[in-house]
Image (cartoon, rainbow, N blue to C red):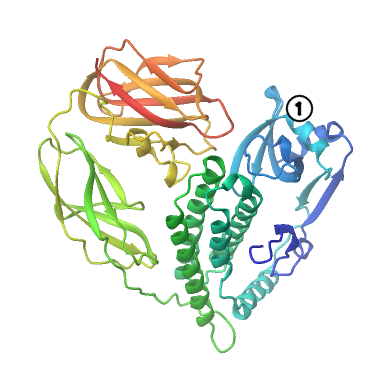
Amino acid sequence: MVLQKKERWQFESRVGYSWSFVGINEIVIPFEDFANVKETLIALVQKGQSVFIWIDNGSVTHSNDYDPALSHSLLVTGYVADKDEFILEDIPSYTNLHYEYSTLKKGCNASDIKYLSYLSTEHYQVSDHKLDVFKEKFLTVIKDYTDDFAFYDKLIVHLEEVGSDYQTHMDVLHHLDDSIAIIAGSRLLFLKYLKRFNLSNDAIALCSEILKIFEFIKVSLSRFMINGKLNRETNYKRIYKVKNLELEMYSLLKNSFSKVNHLVHGNKKRSKTVFPPNEVYMKAATDTSITVAWNQPEEDTWINSYVLFKNGDWFADVEKNQLIVPNLVSETTYEFSVKSKSIFGDFSESSSSVLLSTTEAIKSGDLAKNRAVYSSSEENQLFSKENIVDGNTDTRWSSDPAEETSWIYVDLGSLTAFTSIKLTWEDAYAKKYVILISEDASDWTEVAVQHIGQGGEETIKNLDCTARYIKVLALTKATIYGYSLWNLSVYCE
């Protein structure tokens, strides 16, 4: 796809077996008008059958990333009768999408591909013999596979071609986005094979890390197509890291073959040199918390997480390169150090220790800024919960789109008096939400309810509260995405 600039459907699986080999058959139901197959579709999904449809890209409401001249396949997984909505998935990026029937009808009728299709498992049967056939074919593919993964270098070349004038190169960006999605999807399937056949724990760890990095790349590229902002060096480094991980994974698997061409299952531990972070420093501080951050080492190919130590003792395992440390004492100094941890479980030496101090009690300004935050979920690490208190208007928290109800709360560090709360919503706001407060994060008291949220900046005023924890409980979505906040600010005025 990358080297030849071809579309995903122009390539076939290397495994080389049709679904019918295990008794799975594709059922195709053509139509001229989507209305004629609506009841059939509802009956299928109500029986638990997922069904593929094709929709004109101009009718896609959950993404602006698709070529409007083409059609796009979606997976229908459910139906909400009282709202006349279908529940869809856009594999692999979106789940729990709700489309009104009228929108789906318009899009399906406008598509040049007019049929429903699903996989019938009525005669599905996988015997030990068939599993062995799949496994042997899979192992043969690995054994015979030869590739220098040069397409990763080509990804960077294509990205450099776009330059800063991204709007005139949308065709290239869409192809890159499509390529990255299918590469990530194929690695997900590859990971499932590795796990199903219990081939190599180290290979599983490598493939899992590859998928995690692809998520960052794909989100960064999607944001680039929207606002033109892209940290190129960071993403080039991510792409090269994935390439090195791929080379290592296939080298590991190929070298595990015995003379009889079977993969050795011993899971011999692999070891790599792991370097500690270059510098540990204080990114922000309050009277009860310190945001500890560190620079990752230049050579970080094998690193997938870190271990933070406070006063010489383990404090937390961290996937990112920063953490808000809560429950501290004002005007007190603490010692912090960090170790890097590799995909294979190896640890670096500790970084140099650093002494960091909390501030005196904070009584004015944004009382929530740089405080510890907790949430029901995060869509991914880029849209993490800490973003709502970092004071940066370009960073945000986003919940898992699969959640209908989500929550996020801030820890003010101690009982604190406040009179107003300002929420700055992204487009994916809550139409209905509740503000709750607590002294212990266990027993909550409702102090405000918004029934007709409009998004943007919403300020809850005239409060007379004292609490340590403030929670936003989002109940009704304004969009098909998760809930998303740029900032949560608390004031006493």
The answer to which of 86 and 65 lies nearer the viewer is 65
**Residue at x-position 53% and y-position 49%:** 221
The answer to which of 384 and 151 lies nearer the viewer is 151
**Residue at x-position 27% and y-position 34%:** 371
Percent from the top left, x then y, of residue 191? 55, 63
Q: Where is mark 1, residue-wise?
A: 102
Percent from the top left, x then y, of residue 40? 82, 36
In this picture, residue 483 sits left or right of residue 19: left
Question: Is residue 301 something one can see in this rendering?
Answer: yes
459 lies above or below 194: above
Query: Disc 1 on helix, strand or loop?
Result: helix
100 lies above or below 211: above
**Residue at x-position 14% and y-position 35%:** 359
Direction top: furthest residue = 462
The C terminus, quarter of image? top left
Percent from the top left, x then y, of residue 45? 73, 39
Amino acid type shown at disc 1: Ser
Direction left: furthest residue = 332
The answer to which of 401 and 3 lies nearer the viewer is 3
